[in-house]
Amino acid sequence: MIVPSRICKRNLEYKKWLTEEFGIDGWRLDAPNEIDDDTFWQELRRRCRVINPEAYLVGEIWGDASRWLQGDQFDAVVYYGDEIGLKGRHDPLNRQGMPWHKPESWNRALLEYTRRLISLRREHAALRRGSYRGLYARDGLHAFVRELQGERFLVVLNVNRRPATLAISTAALPELRGEFHDLLGGFSAHADHQQFTGHDLPARSGTVFRQL
């Protein structure tokens, strides 16, 4: 959808006024992909962040959102409850209220795991806006590389309900060679011209390797 410039300008000014006048901390934007203009969303982020450097912008996008998650438009999020293993069913029962009153029901191990992932993302810019290259997607394993300014990370996910042996073909990225360190488990791994090998990956889990 192409939106007339006068409407875009008025929209930006209105959100800026609301943020200033009422101290709004963030915006949840419905179907922002309907406004097919990166400069509009970039300018919205810039204006909100001038007023509040911690302003939070999230957009509801059904599909590949990588275009809007380059660090200059919207922020990545964790859907509330995912970090504690909150269960749900199909719509409209897909998400109950956050059980603040029942902290004993929280999956503490999952919460700490999520916090560690968030910490890694904050520490390393490559995990936020580095280049993305797929390495492997087969038999319940998905691996991809993110790289920025000399830092290279390999993320491996195991969606199976059983442990997976970490022996992934490197044919898609033959230049991926050398030693790697598991930032979550402390293990070592190695990549050569044939495969990436390391410790077994537990069921329904993932980890982040940094090239040494």
Image (tube, helix red, strand yellow):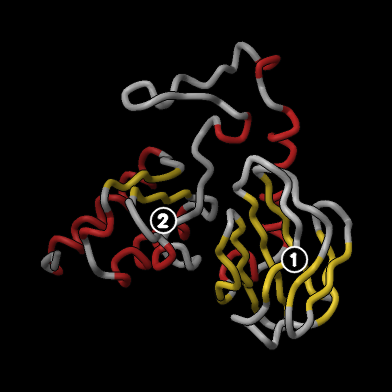
Choose the circle earlier in sequence order: 2 or 1: 2
- The number of numbered badges drawn on the structure is 2
- Would you place residue 105 above or below residue 138 in this image? above
Query: 126 and 9: which one is in front?
Result: 126
Farthest residue, direction top = 101
Q: Is residue 125 visible?
A: yes
Q: Position of residue 11 (x, y in %)?
A: 22, 55
Residue at horizontal 84 percent and vertical 67 percent from the top: 189
Which secondary structure lies at badge 1? strand
Q: Residue type at mark 2?
A: Cys
Instruction: Give the mark toward the camera: 2 or 1.
Output: 1
Residue at horizontal 32 percent and vertical 70 percent from the top: 38
Would residue 44 appear left or right of 83 to someone viewing this image? left
Q: Which residue is mark 1?
A: 167
Asked where in the image residue 21 lies, by quadrant, the reply is top left
Q: Position of residue 205 (x, y in %)?
A: 68, 46
The N terminus, quarter of image = bottom left
Which secondary structure lies at badge 2? helix
Residue 48's mark? 2
The C terminus, quarter of image = bottom right
Would residue 7 appear left or right of 94 to someone viewing this image? left
- Would you place residue 152 above or below residue 128 in this image? below
Q: Is residue 115 visible?
A: no
Task: Report, in whole angstroms, how far the alpha carbon at label 2 lies from the one at label 1.
Answer: 46 Å
Residue at horizontal 64 percent and vertical 55 percent from the top: 157
